[in-house]
Image (tube, grey):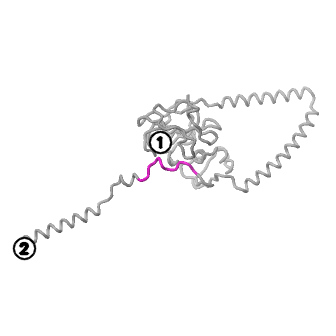
Amino acid sequence: MSRQITVYVTLFLSILLFGCTSREAPAPVSSLDNKVKPATRKVNISGSKYVVKKGDTLYSIAFSAQQDFRTLAKINDIPAPYTIFPGQNISLIKSAQKQKKTKKYTNSSKKSTVSIQKNNKKLKKELDQPKQREYVQKQANKIISEKKRNSNAKVVWNWPAKGKVTQRFSNKENGFKGLQITNKQGASVVAAAHGTVVYAGNALRGYGNLIILKHNDDYLSAYAHNSKLLVKEKQEVKAGQKIAEMGSSDSTVTALRFEIRYRGQAVNPAKYLP
């Protein structure tokens, strides 16, 4: 009888011990990871101010805020080459005080323009004919040289990667602001046009390993979600040069997210690519 009681007690303790162990077991990691998908993360900066983080550049901040980098530089009195530091406050909108100053300056500049025009008229009368011809010729040469510079600044675009376009540009407020080109892991990502690397890193949330190229003062292009970056900031690259390898960093699919920005605003890449 005592032997039978011992067996029952042993069995009861075993069940109790198993129950306690199973309650202390951790929850599956996969169920926690699936709550937030990278595709739902915010990729744009909003508000009136932004605090610079390690790895940021003025170009990357302007890119996320959908603004022209020159506008941010002017608002924050940041001269070329636009060096910024971690912890620095960047104003994304012009303060009321600066707006007042600009208005005063505009009014005074109008007055000075009128006076300059009057002085020019006097000067024109004082100039003899040969000097006038020389002046006109100089002005004509200046206009021609400016036109040449503008024509040289035109960007010739090429496709940044081979693959299938699985997502296209949308004009909607929260729409996709580029092209999604899918291919296999490690597929080549190339520069869509000649330019300079103004950002190479992964500090921009929602873009993963990102490269931003500056082509001229008006156009930037972006290459996101790469598995590997092959260029560094300030490096000049040629059109068609391999700059990264395709991946799925900060994304649910293996694909390149390609964007073109004109003066800070996202434009449809399909209208520029051949």
Contact flag, marks 1 and 2 (Cβ < 8 Å): no
Tell me where residue 42 appears, x and y as whole percent.
52, 50
Question: Seen from this angle, which residue lies furthest bottom?
Answer: 2
Q: Amino acid at mark 1?
A: His
Give the main secondary structure of the magenta stretch: loop
**Other-residue count near label 2 (Cα within 10 Å), few / some / many at <14 / 14–19 / ≥20:** few
Question: Seen from this angle, which residue lies furthest left?
Answer: 1
Instruction: Read off the residue under disc 2.
Output: 2
Alpha carbon distance from label 1 to label 2 = 70 Å
Q: Amino acid at mark 2?
A: Ser
207 versus 19 height, above or below: above
Q: Quadrant of the N terminus?
A: bottom left
Q: Residue at x 10, y 68 (%)?
A: 7
Considering depth in this image, is 55 or 264 the residue closer to the camera? 264
Q: Quadrant of residue 9?
A: bottom left
Residue 210 numbered tag: none
Is 91 situated left or right of 229 in this image? right
Query: Closer to us: mark 1 or mark 2?
Result: 2
Considering depth in this image, is 74 or 28 the residue closer to the camera? 28
Question: Seen from this angle, which residue lies furthest front?
Answer: 172
Determine the secondary structure under disc 1: strand
Q: Which range is magenta?
A: 35-45
Residue 225 numbered tag: 1
Q: Residue at x 61, y 35 (%)?
A: 215
Considering depth in this image, is 149 or 207 the residue closer to the camera? 207
